[in-house]
Amino acid sequence: MKDDKLQTDELNNPLNDAVKSKDLFYDEVAAFHQLNTDLKQIFYLLLHEKIEFKGFSALLTLRVSPHKTEILIEKIFDGYVCYNKNLTGIIMQKPIELAYALSLIHSFIQNKKYTFHYATGIKKYPDVEQIIHRLRNTPCITGCKYCNEVLDIHKGLRKYFGYDSYRTFWRGSASRKAVLAAINNKSILPSFQQEGKSITFRCPH
């Protein structure tokens, strides 16, 4: 909040702007230091060599972890992302986008929702959304802890509705097909006469 705008008729106040920017910067440094140690290491390893973050990273004086970034990510996000998605390639090609994606995923894990900065980040780094979908919404072929638990259409059915199988009618189970399509990131518009819409909405979550 630029409080000088509320107290004076000046068009601008460069000194106050500089002070506010400094305060905001150190607020960000303080917020960073409150993070889990491994999470700080992940963000540092992903971003410290990028020109946009060099000044910020220089003030952190972190002891660099001897572990690979992939190992730290697997440790912190175990059970929340799929690891069979070539993490090494994403780290090398899109480190900033991956850092932003992991930040959003961590916020979702803690608060069950994405932060209000989500739209801003997606606009500046459009690949962030693709990385999130890749790590959390695309079942891997071989299967892993996350995909087998979260992206299993039958486990969601049992968890939320108490059913062991989808109802089958003469054309097959439309709700099962819709849930499977949703988990595989396909656009769907369910239109059932009776049962199915609630199952289609809830099971992929």
Image: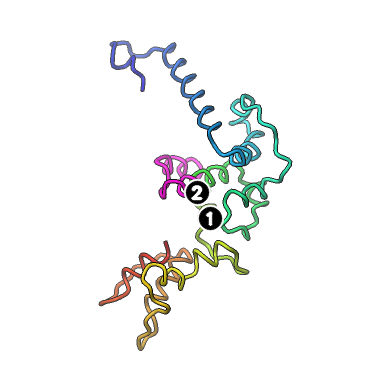
Q: Residue at x 39, y 12 (%)?
A: 13
The residue beneath circle 1 is 80
Q: Nearer the viewer, residue 200 or 191?
A: 200
Magenta stretch, overall SS = helix
Are the residues flagged by discs 1 and 2 in contact, CB closer than 8 Å?
Answer: yes
Which of the two discs, 1 and 2, labels the residue nearer the N terminus?
Answer: 1
* Identity of the residue furthest to the right in this view: 66
Q: Position of residue 170 (x, y in %)?
A: 35, 88
Question: Of helix, strand and loop, which one carries label 2?
Answer: helix
- Figure check: 37 above or below 5: below
Q: How is colour applied across the structure in the image?
A: rainbow
Q: Say which amino acid is labelled 1.
A: Tyr
| Label 2 Cα crowd, 10 Å radius (few <14 / some 14-19 / many 20+) | many
Membership of 181 in magenta stretch: no
Q: Residue at x 57, y 43 (%)?
A: 99
Q: CA distance from mark 1 to mark 2?
A: 8 Å
Which range is magenta? Answer: 105-127
| Label 1 Cα crowd, 10 Å radius (few <14 / some 14-19 / many 20+) | some
Q: Is residue 134 left or right of residue 168?
A: right
